[in-house]
Amino acid sequence: MKFSTFSAGKASELREMKPRAVVFDAYGTLFDVHSVVLRGGNNIVGDIRALSALWRQKQLEYTWLRSLMDRYEDFWSVTQAALRSAARQLQIPADDAQVDRLMQAYLTPSAFPAVRPALESLNRVPMAILSNGSPMMLESAVRHNGLESFFTEIISVDRVRIYKPSPRVYTLGAEMLRLPATEILFVSSNSWDCSGAVAFGYKVCWCKRSEAEMELLDSAPDIIVTELDQIADCF
């Protein structure tokens, strides 16, 4: 188990917190977004790893821009636009059939190896997903990985038609679970998502799988782990 640099008193406080529910981000946290290109990009001529990285970057940028402009489109549409933009920027040819193949692969992303053990170790409390993904995308990803039985709620931003890190999105988790945010542990591997959840009032766990650092937004997570199956050891 790996905590962030907190005092022994803070670590003890976290162990006593015992959240009444756990809410997970989906893409990048439960599901490996880069598995999509590895599965669906075998007919792409070009650097598919660079394409995957830029596709993800553009996808997030488009959600933030659409939120700021108040021009919501669902995550499927945003993801497709981001793919076309990334391919164009990298000068990678991608016709409609190739784009469709990659988009279909986005319906079946691979779960990270530690996901199932993590969910099994936490199943004493209700668990939910709170994601930018559209309902269709989330249901497909959960079903593909055989995780349906673990979640009491699969919550999409479609309900409020704005993307994370809007507080309107984080409100959905507390409302759907009928619990105060302070009694819910929110888990994400995306540091910007953790910042949004901290600002809203959740207890937050950052799954830090890389050398990335936390955003400088006065929003330190309560817990830092390197893999999801370490979370249950905190409580």
Image (cartoon, helix red, strand yellow):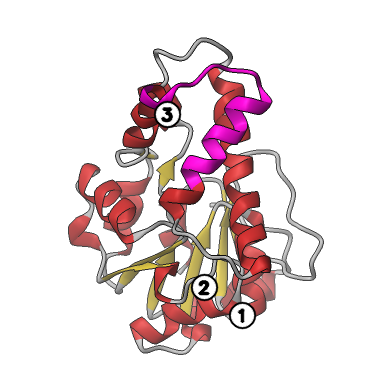
Q: Residue at x 41, y 68 (%)?
A: 158
Q: Position of residue 28 (x, y in %)?
A: 50, 46
Q: Residue at x 46, y 78 (%)?
A: 184
Amino acid beneath label 1: Phe
Magenta region, residue range: 79-97
**Residue 221 visible, this angle:** no
Mark before the other along the chain sequence, 1 or 2 = 2
Left or right: where 43 falls relative to 71: left
Q: Secondary structure at mark 3?
A: helix
In the depicted structure, whether residue 135 falls above or below residue 153: above
Question: Residue at label 3?
Answer: 99
Instruction: Indicate which label's residue lies in the foreground, 1 or 2.
Output: 1
Amino acid beneath label 2: Arg
Q: Which mark is residue 200?
A: 1
| Circles 3, 2 touching at the beta carbon (< 8 Å) | no
Amino acid beneath label 3: Val
- Our reading of the magenta stretch's main secondary structure is helix
Mark before the other along the chain sequence, 3 or 2 = 2
Distance from the alpha carbon under mark 3 to that under mark 2? 46 Å
Q: Quadrant of residue 168?
A: bottom right
User: Would you say residue 173 sits in the magenta stretch?
Assistant: no
Question: Residue at label 2?
Answer: 15
Distance from the alpha carbon under mark 3 to that under mark 1? 36 Å
Q: Residues within 10 Å of mark 2 (few under 14, many from 20)?
A: some
In the depicted structure, whether residue 123 falls above or below residue 171: above
Tag count: 3
Instruction: Indicate which label's residue lies in the foreground, 3 or 2.
Output: 3
Left or right: where 117 falls relative to 93: left
In the depicted structure, whether residue 227 falls above or below residue 185: above
Instruction: Indicate which label's residue lies in the foreground, 3 or 1.
Output: 3
Quarter of the image where the C terminus is located:
bottom left
In the depicted structure, whether residue 221 falls above or below residue 140: below
